[in-house]
Image (spheres, rainbow, N blue to C red):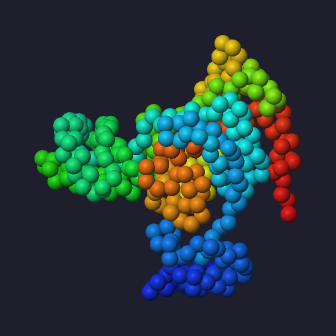
Amino acid sequence: MTDAKTERVPRDKENDYTKAAADMRRRFAEEKTGAKLNHVGAFSVDPATLPGNIENFIGAAQVPIGLAGPLLVDGERAKGAFYVPLATTEGTLVASYNRGMRLLREADGVKTTVIERYMQRAPVFHFDDARQARDFGDWIDARLSAIKTAAEKTTSVGKLSHIQQWGVGPMRYLRFNLTTGDAAGQNMSGKATLAACAWIAENYPGGARFTLSGATDTDKKHSHMNMLHSRGARVVAEATIPDRLIRDIMGTDAATLFRARLVSNVGGMLAGTVNNGMHSANGLTAIFIATGQDVANIAESHAAITFVEIKPGGDYYWSITIPSLIVATYGGGTGLATQRECLELLGCYGAGKVEKFAEICAATVLAGEVSLAAAVVAGDWVSAHDQYGRNRK
């Protein structure tokens, strides 16, 4: 290891996105630390494609990608059978999702619905007292059209849908909700909201002082606000699974799964969990890594609400609602080499595909929920990990 008083990571001031620049930094790191970076340096991505995605590039982290499917989806955008790329180092994960997909396929697939999709930036305006803050809120409501015009001048894609408000002491918290096309939209929303706030400050009588984020946008943090009002896509995946299939494929039955769900709900309440299901973060993270999503958005996207019931004939209805699924099919890391290939594998790269992708993500999550829940009650959860998930080399 090196001490704190060392030279800075080297950069090429002329063109820092070349193989030579990456080689230079790897040699620097090896000299400073004694580590060997042979595999880090064995990459196929063209460094020239990376501006805007990374700085001080040295190579690539190679995460294994497995293929699960077919996943049968009956969505409004995603229709048909899909083979889902899952990037993970957790043994049994791909096998488990594959098993859940088989069960759902035999049950005629997963129905998916995108309820709404917004991205937020949430400024706070500061005043001398609560009455000034309240009056400011009324002024905002009366001028939504002009504020919308100011915000949308910054983007050809983003549209301001609505502004939520909360008064606290001498402050007025606003939450701008924008649609953002096929991009996740955090930067787009920030730029549009800044322009809107500048217009407000210029036109409000006596001026208005603001902080661009008052934290009710909850960027890359879970919040109850997201559970109620959505951030990213609010998407539902649901299926009715015949009891006979649960018995034949999963080795348990609908009644046992239903009782286990009651027990899990109580345990989740005791723990204060933000997801009363099983493990949506597993499938979502694996898809995010494979397809170039911003993986930090798992902090918000993993929250979910499971609802189940036994139908009169004994079959099992199972749904999962993901209220803040933040995904993109354009921009960010989605256009990089392997990431684009994985999106193309799903037919989800580029414009007009983000809701289709959100539906596939939600259907994949449901497959994982079904599989893990059945494994737990059937008693083969630990044995499956022992068989498929051990790598101690």
Spot occupied by residue 372 in the image (x, y as percentages of width and height): 73, 37
Task: Residue 296: tell me if it is visible.
Answer: no
Q: Is residue 370 above or below residue 157?
A: above
Q: Is residue 370 above or below residue 282?
A: above
- 144 relative to 345 in the view: left or right: left
Task: Residue 386: tell me if it is visible.
Answer: yes
Q: Quadrant of the N terminus?
A: bottom right
- 23 relative to 92 in the view: left or right: left
**Looking at the image, which residue is at 64% across and 25% down?**
240
- Nearer to the camera, 288 or 270: 288
- Nearer to the camera, 351 or 27: 351
Q: Quadrant of the C terminus?
A: bottom right
**Looking at the image, which residue is at 66% across and 52% down?**
86
- 302 relative to 116 in the view: left or right: right
Spot occupied by residue 266 in the image (x, y as percentages of width and height): 66, 26
In the picture as drawn, the residue positioned furthest to the left comes out as 205
